[in-house]
Image (cartoon, rainbow, N blue to C red):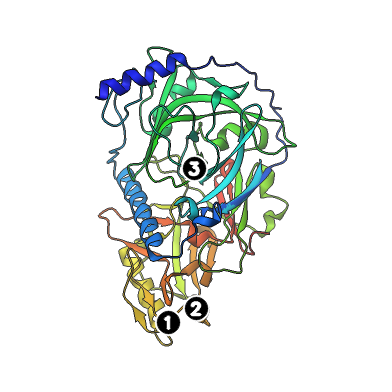
Amino acid sequence: MKLFWFLVFYAHLALASSAVEFEDNDSRHKQASMKFNLYHVRGLDSSQISTSPFLFSDMFTKDEERVKSLHSRLANKDEGVSNSGTTATATSSDKMRGPKLVSTPLKSGLSIGSGNYYVKIGLGTPAKYFSMIVDTGSSLSWLQCQPCIIYCHVQVDPIFTPSTSKTYKALPCSSPQCSSLRGSTLNAPGCSNATGACVYKASYGDNSFSIGYLSQDVLTLAPSETPSSFVYGCGQDNQGLFGKAAGILGLANDKLSILAQLSNKYGYAFSYCLPTSFSAPNSSREGFLSIGASSLTPSSSSYKFTPLLKNPKIPSLYFVDLTTITVAGKPIGVAASSYKVPTIIDSGTVITRLPLSIYTALKKAFVTIMSKKYAQAPGFSILDTCFKVSIKGISTVPEIQMIFRGGTALSLKALNTLIEIEKGITCLAIAGSSETNPITIIGNYQQQTFKVAYDVANSKVGFAAGGCQ
């Protein structure tokens, strides 16, 4: 049966429309950054919004799988890495292998089954627009493509049809971009014996994956901007926990990420502000994603920067040095050595994870203050510090500060620390990690309403409070 699907896939490839070559006319001069609206996926399809605890349970399960995957990669247990050669074979995980700036609105993604954020990008000629989840932990961008030879999940936007784009082409196995796939996706590229097209596999810690053609087309980030050449995955088999998004927009520090591909035009930097998701009903639902060096100015004076660090085990991710955590202005009282673990800032992880020793001390300090006014409640999923009170019923919340090398701090208010998982039950939106090899992950819930600037060219990341205006 596996061989059958493999042959069917290649038969479809042979009948696919011919690719059209195009030239990249981008200016080599760095232009002003491009800015997009950014939304939490909760707002992508308002009819699908749910406030039931099962939504949170599902989200937390996905979140935990992502964290486990990061643990595994840092421990050199890369279970998702394929060591197969470059000729496609019919394996159990990829039935179809032969053939895993600019500024835009950033939105919440709950309604498409995700606790993450999405933007709209244009692809092809003429441009068609798609809702893509923004992920600083992914390198290769991909979206679902017709004819969906194996499987495409339901998405909010119409699925991209490459044959309707005058500028689409599938990249050959001999292309340098194909050779880069192993480093970018942790999976070796495949090659279609029938067409010579490069086949990618992007796989994720929750066993989700996308398999398809490595492709090139023009990317439209704003109507006023000249389209840019863009290399991405055109997915023909996309299965897993992607909700109703069209695909993933990768912002990792890697040569195949959208950031690297646009760096000659805009500069090697980006910034974003994540709008609120669950706990602040009157807050802004729209943030932004801005790609380009000029996204760091003119408000750069308001950013407080800390160095970005490189970890050789996962060089594409963004690491920082967390030095202290305080609750209500007082250090939580753990040894400085407890903080000396890999610390990742990640848009794709929802809930911040702390090594158990740090989390236990934070929990104690937080509960000592909160329990004076609010009764404790049983834990929910990965969250074990909960109170019998609604968000609206809380008058004061002790401020938590995460302080990084150089004194840069995230000062977390109620909207960054508490989440109401069901009516009248509110939990601390930070979790402990009991893994043998501890890591810290600064999740997107704690980043909400902060402007976060990644000056990748100069290896530093900055934070500025004040909302997503």
Cα separation between marks 1 and 2: 7 Å
Q: Nearer the viewer, residue 46 or 231?
A: 46
- Across and down, in percent, residue 139 comes to 47, 37
The residue depicted at 62 percent of the width and 55 percent of the height is: 287
Callouts 1 and 2 close, C-beta under 8 Å: yes
Cα separation between marks 2 and 3: 38 Å
Q: Nearer the viewer's eye, disc 3 or disc 1?
A: 3
Disc 1: which residue: 370
Assign a secondary structure to mark 1. Answer: helix
Q: Which mark is residue 397?
A: 2
Mark 1: amino acid: Met
Assign a secondary structure to mark 2. Answer: loop
Q: Is residue 191 visible?
A: no
- Across and down, in percent, residue 413 comes to 53, 71
Cα separation between marks 3 and 1: 42 Å
Mark 2: amino acid: Val
Mark 3: amino acid: Gln
Q: Nearer the viewer, residue 406 or 361?
A: 361
The image quadrant where one finds the C terminus is bottom right
Label 2: few (<14), some (14–19) or many (≥20) C-alpha neighbours in 10 Å = some
Disc 3: which residue: 155
Q: Which mark is residue 127?
A: none
**Residue 18's image quarter?**
top right
